Amino acid sequence: MKKFFLVPIIALISCSGGPGSSSGSSSQESSSDKSGMIDPGDGKILVAYFSVTNNTEKIANYAKEHLGSDIFEIVPKQEYTAEDIAYNNSDCRANKEQNDPSSRPEIKFSIDDISQYDTIVLGYPIWWSQAPKILYTFMESYDFSNKTILPFCTSGSSPIGSSATNLAKSAPSANWLEGKRFSANASKEEVGNWLDESLKKEEDMKLYIDENELNVVWEDNESVKALKQLLPLTINMHEYGGFEQTGSIGSAITKNDTQIDVVPGDIVLYGGNAISVFYNESSWSYTRLGKINMEKTELEKLLNKSSVTFVLKGE
Ligand SMILES: Cc1cc2nc3c(=O)[nH]c(=O)nc-3n(C[C@H](O)[C@H](O)[C@H](O)COP(=O)(O)O)c2cc1C
């Protein structure tokens, strides 16, 4: 498609005191039936979605019901009219935005406290094989570091394709899971099965350090599979070098070492027979095992001591 004029980046305006507070309080600034407010469930997981013709909204509601999660609608400040999304007209608003790399349509409401969520299930319609530009506005509005993001889309026929991987570039420190495309008439059961399968992968090996259960995203590799064969596993770790806790597994498992830069939260296999957990940056030849979703300051409190007990258990 041809390129259109550039729209200046618009400053984001947040509705303070509005949606998303843990108390579930909300504000609504227009007479529109779109509120964007957080509908509170059990917390921790948030379903956030954008939808113009309600296909994505339907799937998002199925997800919320299945997970008992909170839900937040990404409501555009300037809502899309039927004319705006008439995409057979190259001049329609949606097409102009998709063709403009700097386009960031403003969002009407904001989430007060994103830190309460570990996992975001993120839904959007496919527009010209990609996520609508308002999703980029959303991603750039919050700190998604160490959060797990599970994307899904609805479309006429296009797959999720590169839409999620391109969006992931705007929140590179989040743990992006593989996304899925749903048709407008997907069933609640199909959505529920997908959520169970996608989010279960997150939870099938539990890590406790000094009896604190930690939220870990495990790598999908042969070493993690081998580790699961050893469960339950207790490792007495000791501090090393001012950046890690490390300890022997007691036997060797399959490894695929490469020189990597590790950051706080990384869990790696060292030499095939030891596990290291980092609270500071380092660089060495390791096999990645997983990453703990935790702020550096919290990791320091947990790991910057002479020794810790590292326990892995199955479900
Ligand atoms: C601007 C625009 C571009 C679209 N581009 C595609 C596309 O590339 N492939 C596709 O299968 N569907 C495309 N669609 C159809 C939507 O993805 C589909 O109708 C979606 O389910 C709408 O979701 P919603 O009802 O939540 O807004 C496009 C729709 C619009 C408005």
Image (spheres, rainbow, N blue to C red):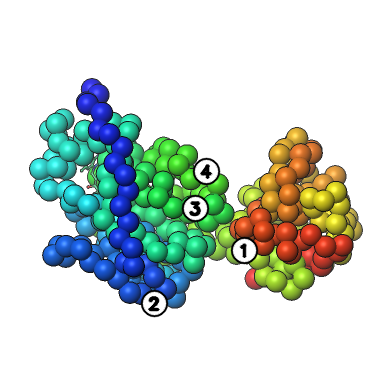
The Cα–Cα distance between marks 1 and 3, rounded to whole angstroms, is: 15 Å
Residue at image location 12% in from the left, 48% down from the top: 81
Quadrant where the N terminus is found in the figure: top left
Residue at image location 75% in from the left, 67% down from the top: 209
Under circle 1, the secondary element is loop
Under circle 4, the secondary element is loop
**Label number found at residue 144:** 3
Under circle 2, the secondary element is loop
The one of 72 and 115 positioned closer to us in this rendering: 115
Closest to the camera, between mark 2 and mark 1, is 2
Residue 10 visible, this angle: yes
Q: Using the image, determine if residue 5 lies above or below residue 35.
A: above
Give the mark, 3 or 4, whose residue is nearer the N terminus.
3
The Cα–Cα distance between marks 2 and 1, rounded to whole angstroms, is: 24 Å
Residue 120 x %, y %: 45, 59
The one of 270 and 134 positioned closer to us in this rendering: 134
Instruction: Report if the CB atoms under discs 1 and 3 are less than 8 Å apart.
Output: no
Taking 252 as reference, is 122 left or right? left
Q: Using the image, determine if residue 167 lies above or below residue 213.
A: above
Q: Amino acid at mark 1?
A: Asn
Closest to the camera, between mark 2 and mark 3, is 2
Residue at image location 16% in from the left, 43% down from the top: 85
